[in-house]
Structure formats: structure tokens, C-alpha cells
Amino acid sequence: MINKVVLVTGANSGIGLALCERLLGSQDAEGLHLCLACRNMRRAHAARSALLGAHPAAQVTLLQMDTSSISSVLSAARELQLRFNRLDYVYLNAGIMPNPQFDLKAFFRGLFSSSVITMFATGEGILTQKDGVTPDGLQEVFATNLFGHFLLVRELEPLICQPGQTSQLIWTSSSNARRSAFSVEDVQHRKGSEPYSSSKYASDLLSLAINTRYNKLGLYSSVICPGFVMTNLTYGILPSFPAFLWTLLMPLLWLIRVFTNTFTLTPYNGAEALVWLFNQKPERLDPRAKYHSLTSVLGHSYTQPRQVSPITLSTFRCASNDVAPFFLILFPDGCRLGHVTGAL
Ligand SMILES: NC(=O)C1=CN([C@@H]2O[C@H](COP(=O)(O)OP(=O)(O)OC[C@H]3O[C@@H](n4cnc5c(N)ncnc54)[C@H](OP(=O)(O)O)[C@@H]3O)[C@@H](O)[C@H]2O)C=CC1
Ligand SMILES: CC(C)CCC[C@@H](C)[C@H]1CC[C@H]2C3=C(CC[C@]12C)[C@@]1(C)CCC(=O)C[C@@H]1CC3
């Protein structure tokens, strides 16, 4: 019998896969149906086999979905409506940081400055990216990390906004999300060099705006920060740095935990806040909090809500106003997706 249906995007590796493993290993796993939404079906099958290897009785299904493609998201949403009559949790986790450029000079300058801890906790000032354009004509980072997910939410309304039932949206945001990287004049960050930071900040805003509109319909949205986690995404930041060198550096990385508890490092620890939210009553959560996965010096992982910074708060106050033009700019002429703009 199915008690809860959980959809996870980007579930075939890293934090998304660790979340699936942890949910299946938990006490509430009985009656859980996990649906892994992935763009690459070969990797999706490998992830499913690994999960079933450890939990042979688990209910794990796959769904092909490329969050950067409008048609793929639309057909995945249609398929979900055929397969399920409700969704209890939707983890909006898929994300990319393409062509990252690591500024070594800024890194060494940062090491000897007063902002060294912020640099390690957020990656601020040392990372930029080169974005691309999708076949739909959207910026790749924005489309993958944010817009595809928002479109999915809109299309899934019949499954997640049901009378007498609550559903949770949980976004994997980042400590790299920065208000100053986001501009309503350039919503997809076409002209800037930090599309990743911008898209994550936009997801924080969007989550707040979704709460404003959808809480009355029983839909609740939260954002989490997984900390700094060793995954394919982070290995890509220093591509000339082979994985075994990262392994050699592990003692140093553990040592850095003395100064910042954001060095969660393993996908298991990074998924902490995602698992914690699974066990919360969403009505009791603070919509302005960001839930951080943190790990202590001794390796103990825990979740802590942190109020968004004062600069962010002032923007949050007018989030609904901010996000509406955000989609109007994207779809000015009411095309196939014009209804999206009506959401906020
Ligand atoms: N690692 C870290 O330190 C941090 C990560 N995050 C966020 O955590 C999330 C998970 O990343 P992480 O586990 O680190 O990295 P991974 O690269 O291991 O996981 C990213 C997942 O997203 C999937 N994905 C990427 N693009 C698409 C797409 N267009 N359509 C569908 N799925 C896609 C990937 O699939 P595929 O295998 O096909 O590439 C993969 O399953 C991301 O949103 C990331 O921004 C946030 C803060 C810190
Ligand atoms: C070699 C080590 C002693 C030091 C590693 C330095 C940097 C590569 C990392 C320090 C903080 C990291 C970080 C991220 C990437 C790698 C670092 C910059 C992220 C930006 C990755 C993606 C996120 O969403 C947030 C991370 C914050 C911390």
C-alpha cells in the first residue's frame, strides 16, 4: 500500500541520491513510493538498482525529465498525473553550475582577509560561470535550476493542491545565493558572470512567493542549503584536480569545520535538512527561514533554520511584486506559457 509519494528531481547522484537512500533507510519508509526524475535514464537505472540493492522491497520508479527543457517538463508532468493521484513531497533538487571558473588569485587574497570564513561558507568572490542557451532560448542555468522546476509545480497543481491534504515543495538552494547577483532588469542573469548564485537567489524568492499564494491551498514551500558537499557538481569546479587529490585533502577539509559548520562534505550530511523537512509539519515552518544542513567538528550533522540576511529580508517583503515581473519579462507576449505569469 502507498502512504506517501515522493518526487525527487536530479535523483541519480549526489545529494538527491543520498536523500533517496536516507528516506528508504528511515523508519517511515514503509508505504513510501519514490519517483526519481532524471534526464539521463542510464544513470537513473543505475541509481534505482543501487537503491533496490540496499532496500529490495522498496517502491522506486523512474521518470524521464530534463528540467532545462519545457517540452520534457510538460510531458513528465502529464505522465505523473497518469501515474499518481497525489504527490506528498516534491524535492526540486536538480541543478547545474556549468563551466565554472575558479579565481585562484581571489582565493589566496580571501585566505588572508577578514572574509575568509564567508568565502569558505559561500564560495563568494571566487567563482564565476559561463552560461549557455537552451534550445527553448532560455539561459541554461536559470532554465535548469529554476524555471523548469517552477513550470513543473504549476503543471502539477492538481496533484499537490488537493482539499484536505498538505503537500511540500523543497528546493535545494545554496549558501552561494546572493541578492546582489540577482536583478529584475536581467532576470536570467544574461549579462552577468554569476548565473548560479542568481538562480539560487531567485529560487529563494520564488519559494516565498509560492507560500504567499499557495499555503491556503495546502501547498507549502521551503528552501534548504546543503553546505559544501563533494559531488559531481563540486568536482567540476576544479576539473584539473583529480578526485584522489580531494581525498588526500579530506583531513584539511575536516579541519576547516573548526571554523565553519557548512563543510558537510558528504552527500549524506548534505541531505540532512532535506530529510529533516520530510519529518516536519509544513504549517509550522517559518516561510522566511532557510534550512541549513550543518556538520560539527566531530562529524555530527544537524539542521538549523537561519533567518535570511537583512538585505534579503527587505527584498523578501516585496517578493510577490518582484517575482511577477520576473516571469512577465520571460514570457512577455503570453505564449504557450503565458499562464505561468498569472501564478504570482
Ligand atoms: N554540492 C554542493 O556543495 C552544493 C550543491 N547544491 C545544489 O544541490 C543540488 C544537487 O547537486 P549535487 O548533488 O551537488 O550535484 P550532482 O551533480 O551530483 O547532482 C545534480 C543532479 O541534477 C541533475 N541534473 C542536472 N541538470 C539536469 C537537468 N537539466 N534535468 C534533470 N536533472 C538534471 C543531475 O543529473 P545528471 O547526472 O544527468 O547530470 C544530477 O542528478 C543542485 O541543485 C546544486 O545546485 C547546493 C549547494 C551546495
Ligand atoms: C582546496 C581546499 C582547501 C579549498 C577549496 C576551495 C574551494 C574550491 C571551495 C571553498 C568553498 C566551496 C564552496 C563551493 C564550491 C567549492 C568552494 C568554493 C560552493 C560554491 C559549491 C556550490 C554551492 O552551491 C555552494 C558551495 C559553497 C562553498
Image (cartoon, rainbow, N blue to C red):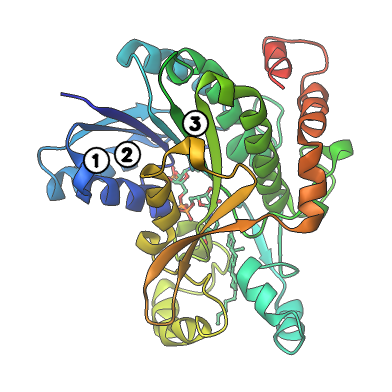
**Residue pointed to by mark 3:** 66
The answer to whether the residue bearing label 2 lies less than 8 angstroms from the nearest atom of ligand 1 is no
Q: Position of residue 335 (x, y in %)?
A: 73, 10
In this view, the residue farthest toward the front is 284
For residue 66, above or below residue 277: above
**Mark 3 to mark 2 CA distance (whole Å):** 12 Å
Q: Is residue 275 left or right of residue 32?
A: right
Residue 40 occupies which quadrant of the picture? top left
Distance from the alpha carbon under mark 1 to that under mark 2: 6 Å
Q: Earlier in the sequence, mark 3 or mark 2?
A: 2
For residue 222, which quarter of the picture? top right
* Whether label 1 touches label 2, CB < 8 Å: yes
Residue reaching furthest right? Answer: 185
Which circle marks residue 44 in the picture? 2
Residue at figure coordinates x 51%, y 23% from the top left: 73
Residue at mark 1: C-beta within 8 A of ligand 1: no
Residue pictured at 58% horizontal, 65% vertical: 237
Query: Is residue 71 visible to us here?
Result: no
Amino acid, disc 1: Arg
- Name the foreground residue: 249 vs 285: 285
Say whether residue 238 is visible. yes
Please tell me whether residue 77 is drawn above or below residue 62 in the rendered image. Answer: above
Total labels: the figure holds: 3
Q: What amino acid is at disc 2?
A: Ala
Does the closest atom of ligand 1 sit within 8 Å of the Cβ of label 3? yes
The reply to whether discs 1 and 3 touch (Cβ–Cβ < 8 Å) is: no
